[in-house]
Structure formats: C-alpha cells, structure tokens
Image (cartoon, rainbow, N blue to C red):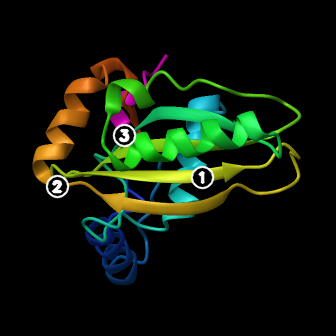
Amino acid sequence: MKVLIADDDRGYRDFLRQLLEQEQDVQVTGIAMDSEVTPRNAVARELRRILDGCPICDGGFRHHAYALLGMVVTDEKQGDQKRLEQFFRLLWEHRWEEVLRFREWSATKDTVVAFAFSCNKARLGILTILSPAEAVSPDNPLHFFILSAEEGRKLQAAVAPEKWIPLRSTLSDHQYQ
C-alpha cells in the first residue's frame, strides 16, 4: 500500500498509527516532501523551526505561505542604525510598498529580515529575524505580530502572487518523472 502522510497534520499521523497497530502485515511507503535542497526550501524550513507551529491557527504549515518583505543591514554605523529604525517604523505603520523596497544585504554584516506569512485561516502575520553574518550562528527571531484582517488584505495586495512560497511542500508541488 502506498500512502502520502502529511507530516504536520495530526489527523493523518493518527490514521497511520492506527492502521499500523491494526494491520501487522501492512507495509507503507511514502515520499519525503522536503527532500529538495533549494534556497526557498531552506528559508521555509528555518521559518518553520522559528515559528514552531502557526501562531494564528496553532497548527502545522500545510497550506501556509511566506513572502520576503524586506531586509536591512544592521551595523554600528549611524547611517545603518537610522535605516534600521526607518525599516521598523515602516513595518509598524504598515507602509508595505516602502517596506518592499528594502533589499539591503551584506555577507559581512548582520541583517534584519522581515517575512510575511499567510495562514490557511485567511490571516497574515509578520515575522522579523536577525540573521547573523556568521554562517555558524543561527537566525534569531526578534518578534512577530498578526495583522488585522483588513491590514492583511492590504499586504496581500502589495505582494505579487508569485512571491508567496509554500511553507511546506505538498504533493502537487512535485512532478514525478
């Protein structure tokens, strides 16, 4: 028997456990959904690790998506600090078009990155992360907030549909050859 078990959906895992307990002679095979090694999958994996479950629906990440909103270099220099303050002010004021223009990155400096994430409950949230320049240091969550439904619609309209990336792959994302 071949089945696809969504690893973040408790109902499917419970079904598989019951099946295996009741049918001792059943063999089950599946597909590793996150077997691709691409930058977007690495980002999704890191966001899932940081969030540890959706803060909106308290569930897994099937049918959830994320989009990069902006990033800004953080440094001790006065100019970098002012840019960081501006970035956060624009986030708090929900000035999405301006936030989307922040695309600063340096391999030798820490970066603050803002992501939007959409829940299958039709709500959106924002997550900011401090991404250290040192590759061995983990990304650190700074904060998240959940937008009102109206503000979520405004953000959804500001981000192009093709910029939304699934937080967890689904079977329809994979083509068999």
Residue density around tag 2, few if under 14, some if 14–19, many if 20 or more, within 10 Å: few
- Of the residues tagged 3 and 2, which is closer to the observer? 2
Q: Residue at x 89, y 34 (%)?
A: 108
Kindly indicate whether the residue at mark 2 contacts the one at mark 3 (C-beta within 8 angstroms): no
For the residue pair 30 and 154, the one nearer the viewer reads as: 154
Marks 1/3: CA–CA distance: 26 Å
The residue under label 2 is 148
Question: In the picture, residue 22 is in which quadrant?
Answer: bottom left
Q: Residue at x 19, y 52 (%)?
A: 123
For the residue pair 65 and 12, the one nearer the viewer reads as: 65
* Residue 172 shown in magenta: yes
For the residue pair 130 and 42, the one nearer the viewer reads as: 130
- Amino acid type at mark 2: Ser
The answer to whether residue 160 is left or right of residue 121 is: right
The answer to whether residue 130 is left or right of residue 96 is: right
Kindly indicate whether the residue at mark 2 contacts the one at mark 1 (C-beta within 8 angstroms): no
The boundaries of the magenta stretch are: 168-177
* Residue 123 shown in magenta: no
- Amino acid type at mark 3: Thr
- Amino acid type at mark 1: Ile
3 or 2: tag closer to the N-terminus = 2
Residue 49: percent from left, percent from top? 57, 61
The residue under label 3 is 170
Marks 3/2: CA–CA distance: 28 Å
The residue under label 1 is 129
For the residue pair 90 and 142, the one nearer the viewer reads as: 90
